[in-house]
Amino acid sequence: MATLGLPDSPGVPAALAQLTLTVPFNDAEAAAGVFRRRGDEIAAVIVEPYVGNAGFIPPEPGFLAALRALCDQHGALLIFDEVMTGFRVAAGGAQAQLGVRADLTTLGKIIGGGLPVGAYGGRAELMRLVAPEGPVYQAGTLSGNPVAMAAGLATLRETERPGFYETLERRTGRLVAGIVDAARRHGVPVTTGHAGSMWGLYFAPGPVRNFSQAKASDTALFARWHRAALARGVFLAPSAFEAGFVSSAHTDGDIDFTLAQLDAALGEARAR
């Protein structure tokens, strides 16, 4: 079972789609219903602990804990996709922040300072199944790439500096709060959220608990805002359904500049 991926999406083989069950994010009852019907067949639940592939959607209290309990009850693995959240929301990822431990965790290029690198890890008994100790073989063209590994070590050392995550959290909070203030001044409904350096918004009154509700936001306004911001030197993600991130390289001055430009860009986008 997974809470991401659409069975009819281009590029997803029909055979794989037939083996995947989907439920809405933040709907613990829907997940429980699937387990009641198919629990003996479910091998794993794959979920982004904070959704970043539909904007930014935080888990509601108890949702991830409910998934953890369902997996324990039925003998399934809980897999957290922390490609976006790992080392961005906390040193221990979303798991450390939310207090729910996954059986397996996937990580992406954030651990390499942006260079191509991926990693996964989990419980010792599961990792012992991987070659050379176990029968599961895993390899990749860029596995152990020395440049990416050096960048990764340098990135991890940066995160160990005192106050690193506290500063990221503060600057991200300032950015999000400033966008909310700008939207209020321009009479635009907005729903925002952030965790650590990860943030997102929807031009909608909210709440936004899942992708269906995210799709009800004003994507045309976002597109105009994006173009206006781009012309002013602020490079937002071009999709309304993509999370944003504040970097440790961003200063308070950068946040001030960004907010001024986003405010003006929203005024332009609202007037069109």
Image (spheres, helix red, strand yellow):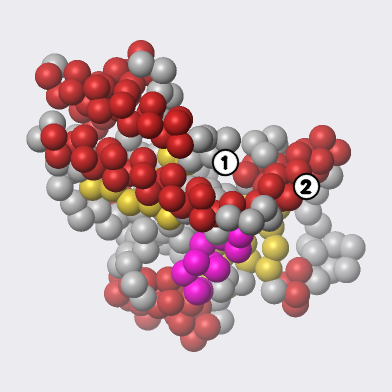
Q: Which residue is mark 1?
A: 248
Callout 1: SS: loop
Using residue 92 as the reference point, say whether residue 7 is left or right of it.
left
The mark found on residue 115 in the picture is none
Q: Classify residue 231 by image quadrant.
A: top left
What residue appears at the point 29 percent right and 45 percent down from the top-left corner? Answer: 177
User: Is the residue marked by circle 2 packed among few (<14), some (14-19), or many (20+) residues within 10 Å?
Assistant: few
Residue 4: say if magenta. no
Q: Nearer the viewer, mark 2 or mark 1?
A: 1
Which residue does the numbered mark 2 point to in the structure image? Answer: 153
At which x and y percent is residue 214? 26, 46
Residue 140 sits above or below residue 92 on the image: above
Q: Residue furthest top?
A: 231
Q: Is residue 192 above or below residue 104?
A: above
Region in magenta: 91-100
Q: Residue 48: x and y, percent? A: 47, 57
Query: Please, what is the three-letter code of the amino acid marked with disc 1?
Result: Ser
In terms of depth relative to the viewer, which is nearer, 156 or 210?
A: 156
Residue 122 visible? The answer is yes
Q: What residue lies at 46% left-to-right and 82% top-to-bottom?
A: 69
For image coordinates 36% across by 40% down, the residue present is 175
